[in-house]
Image (spheres, rainbow, N blue to C red):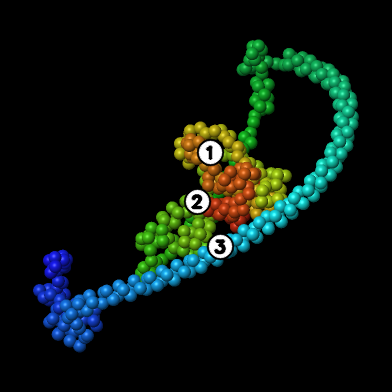
Amino acid sequence: MAEGGETIIQKPIPTCDNHPSDEVEVYCKHCNKAVCFDCSRIHHHNHDCEGIVKLSRRLRQQIPETCQQIRDGTLYRMKSELESIRLIQRENKEKQKEEATSLENLQTQCMEAVKGIFQSEIIKTSENLKKHNDKLDAREQELIRKIENLNVHVQSHEDSQLTYGKFELLEMDMVLRKMTNDYRSMDTDGAVYSSSLKTPLTSTIIDSLKESLTMEDSLPHFPADCNGDHDNSGHHRLMEPYIITKEARENCPICMDEFTDPQKLTKCGHVFCKECIESFFSYKPSCPNCGVIYGNRTGDQPEGRIAIAKDMTRLPGYGSCNSIKVTYVFMDGKQGPDHPSPGTPYKGITRSGWLPDNKEGRLVAKLLNVAFTRKLVFTIGRSRTTGNDGVLIWNDIHHKTRTHGGAERFAYPDPTYIERVMDELSVTGVTEESADDPTEYEEYSKVF
């Protein structure tokens, strides 16, 4: 408690670092450090030093003056800023008045211009509509005459077909009668089947019927392995053994540990543990460091069909060209060994995607054909729309399933779609450089 009842909070006086039992008494300005009296004489005798008490009094006397300087400077800056703000406000008000006047004048001019344009367009539109209606009336009369002529031809054709049909029926009747007589006289020894009327049928007839009813599977059969550069030994064509010197002291970029059976990639030269890079290649066939593609990845897409066709539809954003329609068809089937629930049935689907019929769109169509052949476009999983499991879904290669509606409706216009889908195809290993096998884009080759 100080004189006058004023409370003073004091901290313990710190001790010297070199002499813990001695309190600091001297401040060395050269070393910016408080030390005891003995240290000031021994270690700081040539330095500019000052007693702690004297220094604290001098600094305490400077505090009011420093605070006053700060207050004066702050007040001056605030006044200057206030004047600047007021000046800017006045200038803004004047500019607002000028802009308002200019805007009113511009609005009046625009209204007059629009009014004149509308009147001119209304006159032109009325004239064009009259001409168009006259053409439609003439076309209607022409179509009426053609329909009347067609009715005459149809009636004549029906009469001739009826006459021809009578002769056909007579000939068929004669043939059936002859076949009946031939079958009645056929030897039925050794019959092993009977009809619903319990009339014996010879094995010759049954074999003939079986052969005529044989059907072949029309679905395309893709090769089990579409990995191109891969062979029965895995990825050894893509990499070669590599010796790590003791001086190098490098670690595998994937596991961040010392190399185990190091392998150098043949294209880019980066080195990884054999187990690490083979595991990475099973997910994505590219170098983890630089992204160079190695080989072709094969997915778990079920068997299906792809069709590519040209279409006359013009897509928003691509008004100078027609479009390409890519259609995928999958029949009902069962999940295979690579799917989440082998043996579980799944429903077939039909899906379509749209592309512009230009250079970039044709390249995407070709690469989609390659991706489909490599079983990468679809997979079995959970539907994001319904939440159902075990259904056919897109496999992260986005398609424009509608022609109009914008990107939010998976449609056009979408200026960056082609670039994005090329990136998505590249992630799966499907690039223009890797699409060098014509058997992987046969449907595309039928159209382009």
**Spatial distance from mark 1 to mark 2, Cα to Cα?**
30 Å
Residue 242 picture quarter: bottom left
At x 62% / y 17%, what residue is drawn? 193
**Spatial distance from mark 3 to mark 2, Cα to Cα?**
81 Å
Could you tell me the amino acid type at mark 2? Asn
| Residue 36 vertical position relative to residue 350 in the rendered view, above or below | below
**Spatial distance from mark 1 to mark 3, Cα to Cα?**
64 Å
Quarter occupied by the N terminus? bottom left
Q: Which residue is mark 1?
A: 392
Percent of width and height locating residue 71: 34, 71
Mark 3 lies on a secondary structure that is helix
Residue closest to the eye, 127 or 61 = 61
Could you tell me the amino acid type at mark 1? Leu
Residue farthest toward the left in the current orientation of the protein = 21
Q: Which residue is mark 2?
A: 232
Q: Which residue is mark 3?
A: 93
